[in-house]
Amino acid sequence: MRGLFPVVIVVGLSACRTGGAPAPEPDPPTKQVSSADEAEAGADEGAEPRANREGGDDCVSLVEVEVVEDAFDRGVAKLEQSREGEHYRSEPFEEAMGALKFAGDNGHLAASSLYGRTLFSVMFVAAAPTEERREDYVSALTALRVAALRGDIEAQQYVPGLMGPKIVGSEPPLNDLPGPWVTEATERAEAWLTCHRAEAEAREASPL
């Protein structure tokens, strides 16, 4: 499978949702920990949601570019720190995924691609796609779809089926995922792109 690399995750990850309550303290390494909790850690707690005119009042504007860039840099550094041979150490890996997800959710293209590729490979290699891991798979596939449609070559080449009107799960490895998971990832990606694509691409055209 193109782009996947052999890893063994030290601790399983569960739900990867965006939004909600602030991150709790990390669980001990022997317990399953939600990567959504870590995603919230990168948020700018003092920022007020702002309506995104293109996506409507249900969309909120992306956080400040400086905050997003800092989260991406932190995520990359933590990911490197987490590597231990063919393993990832759980706490820095979870911190890396949280920071990268936050940056990707706020329009950072490289973060979205790296988050999706890394989490998908870890989940796919670590265990079969069971219902308790649904949110991680859907979150990773959503990020890959968003990054692919925004032009990230690595995301486009990572798994087949990302570039059509919807994600096509008829080829490996996506054919191992339940159809509703693939559909949900397509819908989440479409919702993000409707709300944020124009704003994110405007930022890319006017870098710091």
Image (cartoon, rainbow, N blue to C red):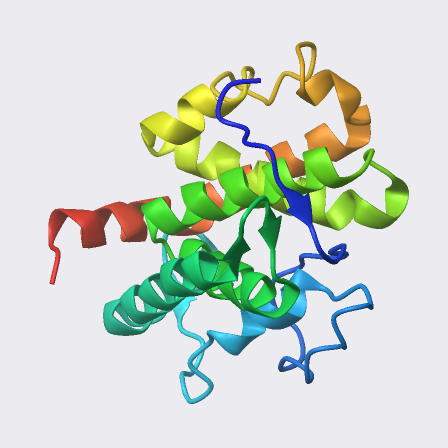
Quick check: 26 above or below 119?
below
Task: Give the farthest residue toward the top.
Answer: 171
- Front residue (pair 58, 120): 120
Residue 116 position, x and y percent, is: 52, 42
Q: Is residue 62 left or right of residue 82?
A: left
Q: Quadrant of the C terminus?
A: bottom left
Q: Quadrant of the N terminus?
A: top right
Going 54% across and 28% down the picture, which residue do you hit? 4
- Front residue (pair 170, 20): 170
Quick check: 195 above or below 99?
above
Task: Give the farthest residue toward the bottom.
Answer: 46
- Front residue (pair 125, 41): 125
> How many numbered circles does the render carry?
0
Give the quarter of the image for residue 5.
top right
Going 54% across and 67% down the picture, which residue do you hit? 92
Residue 197 visible to the viewer: yes
Residue 33 position, x and y percent, is: 75, 66
Give the quarter of the image for residue 185.
top right
Q: Is residue 161 left or right of residue 55?
A: right
Quick check: 161 above or below 29?
above
Residue 89 position, x and y percent, is: 61, 61
Q: Is residue 195 left or right of residue 206?
A: right
Residue 188 visible to the viewer: no
Q: Is residue 44 left or right of residue 110?
A: right
Task: Give the farthest residue toward the front.
Answer: 85
Going 61% across and 70% down the picture, which residue do you hit? 91
Going 53% across and 43% down the picture, which residue do you hit? 118
Residue 97 position, x and y percent, is: 54, 59
